[in-house]
Amino acid sequence: MVFTGGGTEADNLAVIGVARVAAAQGRGRRIVLSAIEHKAVSAAAHLLEPEGFEVRVVAVGADGLVDLDDLDDALTGPVAVVSVMLVNNEVGAIQPLDAVAEVVRERAPGAVLHTDAAQALCWLDVRE
């Protein structure tokens, strides 16, 4: 467990750290994230582009949910990290993380699935 000063620092550590470790281990240089990720995640991913990482942004539907077909298409070849936030802080869309995880396990089993769940407390009962 790693404690950080806040959500931005935690997202930066997760995305940048996992991507760099994956690349060093030869597990890919692609970062896949949803179009509605918090700036802490998307900015961290794009910071890695000058290092040769490819950032693929997955579409969301009108309901704010990740397009699972587009996610499936984005997971071709080696993928380092996939990031899909649990609850969007602007529209409140609750992502189907079970379905997302299933697609990631199937299409990119070496990828790490990251989720920013900071907003979940505002929208979900997390006591269970």
Image (cartoon, rainbow, N blue to C red):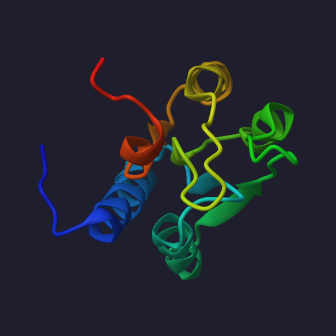
Q: How many marks?
A: 0
Q: Quadrant of the N terminus?
A: top left
Q: Nearer the viewer, residue 15 or 94?
A: 94
Q: Residue at x 58, y 75 (%)?
A: 46
Q: Nearer the viewer, residue 25 or 50?
A: 50
Q: Nearer the viewer, residue 15 or 92?
A: 92
Q: Residue at x 37, y 61 (%)?
A: 11
Q: Quadrant of the C terminus?
A: top left
Above or below, 105 relative to 19: above
x and y percent of residue 86 in the render?
Answer: 51, 41
Q: Residue at x 38, y 29 (%)?
A: 125
Above or below, 33 relative to 66: below
Above or below, 96 relative to 32: above
x and y percent of residue 108 in the render?
Answer: 61, 30
Q: Quadrant of residue 112?
A: top left
x and y percent of residue 5 in the render?
Answer: 16, 69
Q: Residue at x 53, y 76 (%)?
A: 43
- Answer left or right for 35 relative to 30: right
Above or below, 60 relative to 68: below
Q: Nearer the viewer, residue 94 or 27?
A: 94
Q: Quadrant of residue 30?
A: bottom right
- Answer left or right for 75 relative to 121: right
- Answer left or right for 50 relative to 103: left
